[in-house]
Amino acid sequence: MRILFITPYVPSPIRVRPYHLIRQLARSHEVVVLTLWQHEREQEDLNALGSLCSVVGVRLSRARAVANCLRALPSRMPLQGAYCQSKELVRLVRGALGEPRVAGNIAGQPLPAALRGPFDVVHVEHLRAGYVASEIPRHVPTVFDSVDSISLLFERTSRLSHSRRQRFLARFELPRTRAYEAELVQRFDRIAVTSPEDADALRALSGTDRIAVVPNGVDLAYFQPRRDSAEPATLVLSGKMSYHANVTAALHFQARIFPLIKQQCPDVRFQIVGSDPPSAVQALTGDPAISVTGYVPDMRDYLGRATVVICPVTVKVGIQNKVLEAMAMGVPVVCTREGFAGLQAQPGQDLLVADTPSEFAAHVCRLLGDADLRSQLGQAGRRYVENYHQWNLAARRIADLYQDAIEQHKRRSATDSVTTADENGK
């Protein structure tokens, strides 16, 4: 297949889902990525992606993104849908999928050779790139990787985020996003999401049954168990700390769970590992048992030394990559019921799941005092991700959705041809 893969951000080892899907798909298919980029540092990611497939990057300045949002405020368009709008990206989509242009030109400007059609299928990543749906001709098969239900995320954020600002924005965006998301998924032949609860949320919004669950994978060659022994009584929470849901998780754990653990395990240490921690998180280091690293070049160095990896999230959708990565490294994991959602793992066998702060603390203390249980859970967790979360399996499911969309269009074309022949014969 020849695949046009449209994404509103540069796929990279940080933006794991599109990056690894492209990496796997490019082994058997011709993939052309059309993507937006904002920061100069993303040039390295573009170059790295270019070693896997053809890539066309379009600059979206921060000023343009802000202007998009301001223009959307009085409209029905959600800010998530407006943020990445780009006239240049639209021009290129039209050129790639429209009627052939003389000498590969559109609107008087050259079309990059990689974008010259035809394409067998168009893959659109995330709601932020959804605006291109109206530019895709009806005869072109389409797949939308929604990743998560943004409406579901905003609904939970509006109730549970630590940030008053985030709760306000979520409440403002929620009705607009629900209407937009419900209409958007109707425009695609097939839709993918990472978890069953996101699929249920989109079905409830749109009424469509064209939604399939394609879980995230893990780079099992990169995240491997390490033989160096874990540091004693060290708990690690990982994730991008500029993301409000991770901040909420860190503050929730520090306030409601960590004190319970320290009562039984006074020597315990808590490490918060991830880029761009806000002042609310940095302030937690007033407790000498808590450290905040900020950006680290290799997350494996911290996951590998953790006695226990924790995932105390209360605001989330989709699948928690941080849980999968820790399990892949053979480190025992304790998570909330929210952090567990979307996994097929067995609680108590592959990881430990808690419904209350006291249960979470009890699980952690039990693991800190039982090396055999840590080893048992770590090995079971690794087996679980090997069986259920390999990227080649995810890419195979996406390719099946491509084929379904293509076959649907063939059947529709055949039906239309018969109908036209019958009408001409009258």
Image: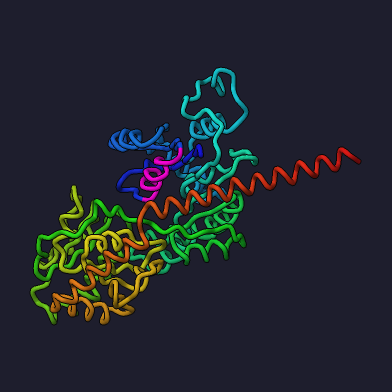
The residue drawn where x is 47% and y is 54% is: 397
Q: Answer yes or no: is residue 64 visible.
A: yes
Q: Measured from the top left, where is residue 287 in percent x and y?
A: 12, 68
**154 in relation to 87, above or below:** below
Q: How many marks?
A: 0
Question: Start and end of the magenta stretch?
Answer: 17-29
View extreme (right): residue: 426
**117 in relation to 108, above or below:** below
Q: Measured from the top left, where is residue 327 in percent x and y?
A: 26, 64
- Near-viewer residue (328 or 132): 328
Q: Confirm whether the magenta stretch covers residue 19.
A: yes
The residue drawn where x is 13% and y is 61% is: 305
Q: Answer yes or no: is residue 66 visible.
A: no
Left or right: where 298 falls relative to 139: left
Q: Measured from the top left, where is residue 176 in percent x and y?
A: 54, 56
Which of the 4 quarters of the picture holds residue 317?
bottom left
Left or right: where 2 falls relative to 353: right
**Quadrant the C terminus occupies:** top right
Q: Measured from the top left, where is residue 266 in percent x and y?
A: 9, 77
Which of the 4 quarters of the picture holds residue 204?
bottom right
- Near-viewer residue (140 or 243): 140
Q: Confirm whether the magenta stretch covers residue 291.
A: no
Which of the 4 quarters of the picture holds residue 321?
bottom left
Magenta stretch prevailing secondary structure = helix
View extreme (top): residue: 103
Left or right: where 117 falls relative to 296: right
**125 in relation to 270, above or below:** above
- Asked which colour scheme the image uses, the reply is rainbow
